[in-house]
Image: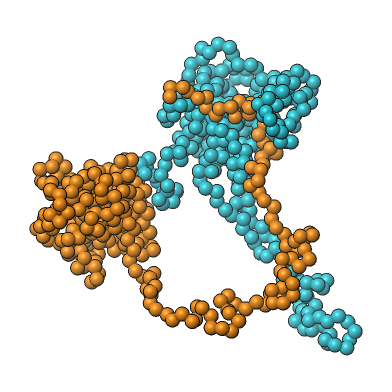
Amino acid sequence: MSFTRKPGGKALDILQNLPRISLANLRPEPGTKKAEKKRGRGQHGGNRSGRGHKGERQRGNRPRLGFEGGQTPFYLAIPKYGYNEGHSRRAQYQPLTLNRLQYLIDLGRVDPTQPIDLTQLVNGRGVTIQPQKRDYGVQLVGEGAGIFAAKVNIEVQMASEEAIAAIERNGGMVTTGFYDPRSLAVLCKPVPFFISGQPIPKRMLPGEDMVPYYTDAANRGYLADPEKIQKARIALAQKYGYILPDISKDELFHMLSMIKDPRQIFFGLSPGWVVNMAEKKILKPTDDKLLQYYSS
Amino acid sequence: MFRISVTVCGRGISKRLASSFSGEDALPSNLRIPSNLVDRARAERPPPPSDSSLPVLRRCDAAVPVHLSPVQTWVETLERRDSKQLGLVDLHPDVFAVPTRIDILHEVELWQRNFKRISRAHTKVRSEVRGGGKKPWRQKGSGKARHGSIRSPIWRGGGVSHGPRGPTSFYYMLPMRVRVQGLKIALSSKLAQDYLHVVDTLNIPTPDPQYLMDLIRYRHWGESVLIVDVGEELPENILQATESLKTVNVIPAIGLNVHSMLKHEVLVLTLEAVKFLENKLLWHDERFTLLYPFKLPYTDLP
């Protein structure tokens, strides 16, 4: 519509003729402030003050919550079983649907011409990761595999088979990588970490229970054999019935084949470096022992 | 307060307002003004020059939405008491022409008053009052009422049952966007009601407070003036001039707040202050949710 509306509209026109808005003229929207109920005052709040008539109710001597008059209460009658045992110590992976990923790419919040990392997803406010609450990263979920149509190089922490198939069908690359909690915090919020002035830590390797997952080519683990991954890509294409596009002939092949080193957290930055954001400089260690430690 | 004078000005207002609020009860009681009550300063302010040949000294830096157009006001100068307008300035409509919401101004004003409040009222409970451990007299046989302690709340000199307990904090934070919207609404209402003036710089010829008072009275600005500039160092003359004045105050642009804007009748901004405010207030319209504290540096990319 080429019609230009006057900014502020009629409200500002009316305001010109009204008294000056000052501290004496302010008031809340009628109906937002409801008067507080005062116990023990007035005809309706007084008398028994909402406590009822005699007995434990009025005298404040009721038994504890869950007490059933002496009958074995529900919370004791039911036997225990470890459904939720150790629930607060279990690893959690925030799901990322292909629907959501497509939405983010379409709106321009995530750039498909660069490798998509957890940092890019968090910057685009696509997922919310809380490393302090036992989140270990993001898992790619296959919902929306039918409509997904973007060629991306994405790195997640876990991925379902359908999701891997959908991405590879469109000519992209999926990698699953492990981040220990400290590296994950650094990855999700890099700016506060760089301001703190600490050197970039090296990523720790996964624990015993997750090593089989990350060394398996079917999960596109970052510790798996590249040849086995190639075979797994072909096998998956056969299973799901699509022709595997040849990435090596793609113009973005260099970007699609970018994978992080197992000890690396950021693309282009090695462990041990210190990033100075104020002066836009990177400081690298020169001591032998440090270099040996960070390159191990 | 308004000075009562019998003039023709206000007669048509109540009729105009009644027609715009057709069908329902017109204004709330604190907005209804008698028709012969008028703000003399506003009436005596010189009418705008009829020629529009003044140059536009400043355009909006940020992109103005397509369906809106910038609001304009004159740029004046404080150099001479009776100088004319230097030119026009474009003001971004999303900062200086937002719809008025008195309830948001009310919320922000209450927040400003209360979030710093720490009430240090403290009374002693019956256990804290000195004494009162011993039973005053035996339970039965003395003919007096039964009591366990001389400091119970029934007794004179006894503890207070439900009194204020210790330093209480009334701290709470309104969402950042509500506070930003409050600033925008205050600026818009000042502009809409002719209480906003833009000035090129704050350089005045003398540090004499009388010069400022003369200037304000000559230009019929109003009773109290809040002058806003950007930067850590403000011109010496204006600082000296306003030091002894109670109703004219100078603040840096980061100190702009709704309470001060409503307390002072007139708001005077410099061109740099306008640029700074537009920049800071418009950023919140198009930002993503904050990932880390606002104190740390944010680039314009999310």
Residue A289 picture quarter: bottom left
On screen, residue B255 above or below B46? below
Which chain is depicted orange? A
- From what the image shows, is residue A277 above or below residue B239? below
Instruction: Tell which chain the image draws in cyan.
Output: B
Count of numbered badges drawn on the protein: 0
B300 versus A266 height, above or below: above
> Is A40 on the left-hand or right-hand side of B89?
right
What x and y, as percent, mark residue B189?
A: 60, 31
Q: Is residue A229 visible?
A: no
Q: Residue furthest right?
A: B143
Percent position of residue A141, x then y: 28, 56
At x 52% / y 18%, what residue is drawn?
Answer: B87
* Residue drawn 21% across the image and 65% down it: A213
Q: Nearer the viewer, residue B178 or A236?
A: A236
Q: Which residue corresponds to the image point at 55% horizontal and 27% vertical from the top-left?
A: A9
**Relative to A136, does residue A149 appear above or below in the rendering?**
above
Query: Which of the pair B195/B251 is nearer the observer?
Result: B195
In the rendered image, which quarter contains the N terminus of chain B?
A: top right
Residue A128 seen by the camera: yes
Residue B92 in percent (x, y) is at 48, 29
Q: Which image quadrant: the C terminus of chain B?
A: top left
Q: Position of residue A217 (x, y in %)?
A: 15, 61
Task: Judge by depth and name the residue closer to the eye, B252 or B238.
Answer: B252
- Would you say B145 lies left or right of A27 here? right
